[in-house]
Image: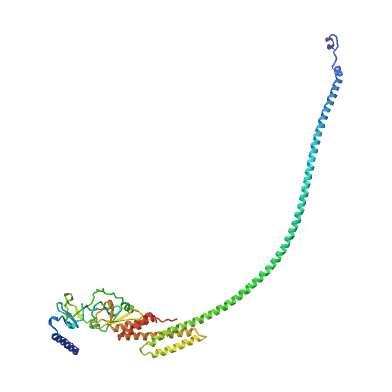
Amino acid sequence: MSDTAGNGGVKSPGIGEKLSFSLPAILVALVLSIGISYAILNVVNSNTRKDLNDALKEQNDRLTNSIGELQKKHDLLEKDHTALVAKAKQIEDDKNQLAAALKATNESYTGFRAEYSKFVDAQKDVDKGQNQDIQVTSTNLKKVEDRVHYIDEKLKKLDEVAQDVLTLKTDNAGLKEEYKVLRTDLTAVKTKADVTEKDLTDLAERARLFQLRVLAARAREAADAARKTDLKNLLSRLEDVEDGK
Amino acid sequence: MMIRSKLFLRSVAVLALLCGLGCDNDRDSSSYVGGKYLLRPGKHVSSQIAGWVAVPGNEPKTIDDKTSGLSYAVLTTHDVVPSTMSGWVAINPSLFAKMSGIKVEAPKDDQSELIVLHRGELISGDLANWVAVPNSQPQVEVSSTKKDNGLAKLSSQNIVPKELNGWVAVNPDTLATLSEKYMMTGKGSRTSKE
């Protein structure tokens, strides 16, 4: 009430009146702003959608291309895989064949080895038997050779000693006779097949005793030559002992 | 013994007579002593000893080896063999060593030559107390195969030549013993039992 009195008697409109006068404008402004916003948003949205669609399309194309390439590669790989599988199968077959062949060879080799071992064993037996035979034969031969050599040596020595007997000037009939008997016995033993160790020992002892008798006779003769100062004869006797007769 | 002495004295007397009759006293160059003619310096060589040789008159000395029981004498050049060693045998030292095991040392050889006496030659003073003996030397026997083995029979008045210097003289019995032993024990006496 105070407000009307104050403005010259003109009553100022109230708030409600003010609102009732400005509301249509506000509504119009609001509608306009909403319409404009919508238009703007619609435009922006359309552009964005278009861009998105383009991008999506492009991406889809690229993806499709990639999938195509992948498909091609997959096909190639599958082809290669098929070929590899075929080859692997071939290799497997070959391996099986080789294994079979190897097994057969191995079996054959085992058999051969067994046969060879048998052959070697048999050969060893044969060799052993032959070696034993050879050894026995060699031993027997050596024994015979040793005996023959032994007796030959004795005969040789005896003959050398006999030369002294023949050159002795003193009475040596007994020695000569002994030499004959001893030589006959030695020759007989040489040709005897079953000569024993005792036979040889006896003969060796007889030969040794004979040598001693000859030595004694020779020494006596040397002493006689010395007493008679028969120097030539004495030197000859001394030569005998130094020559090792 | 008596007979031998008488014969010896008679021989001396006959020789003295012969010398007295047949020789000029100026030429009486020696006197007969003990089987040798002793030379007198200043005298002339007489016809009896012409061709003989003059030597000092040394004789080999007998050595009695008690270890081996052997008696032997080592000869030196120009030794005169005495009558007591007549018939002995000289042995080469190496052979003697083999036979007896004794190694003897050879005396030093004086390298002198034998002086041969010629008739009428003046006997010099160097020959004082020397003797004149016939130039007879022992006959050496050498082994045909072992040249080192040598033996020589000695006779009275033999002169020991240079070749026999150091040889060993033994009597025949000793030589017989040595020989017999050597023949039974030497190299050639081995008998085998095999």
B132 or B76, which lies in front? B132
Judging from the image, the colouring scheme is rainbow
Side (left or right) of A218 relative to A102: left
Please give the count of numbered marks on the rendered protein: 0
Task: Report which quarter residue A240 is drawn in.
Answer: bottom left
Identify the image quadrant of the C terminus of chain A: bottom left
Residue found farthest to the top: A8
A75 or A92, which lies in front? A75
- Give the vertical position of B164 relative to A213 (above or below): above
Residue A218 placement (x, y as % from top left): 36, 85
Side (left or right) of B46 relative to A124: left
Residue found farthest to the left: B25
Residue A115 placement (x, y as % from top left): 66, 71
Side (left or right) of A168 relative to A187: left
Identify the image quadrant of the N terminus of chain A: top right
Residue A87 placement (x, y as % from top left): 75, 56
Residue B3 placement (x, y as % from top left): 19, 90
Image point (77%, 46%), residue name = A70
Side (left or right) of A37 relative to B63: right
Task: Report which quarter residue A45 is drawn in.
Answer: top right
Image point (75%, 58%), residue name = A90
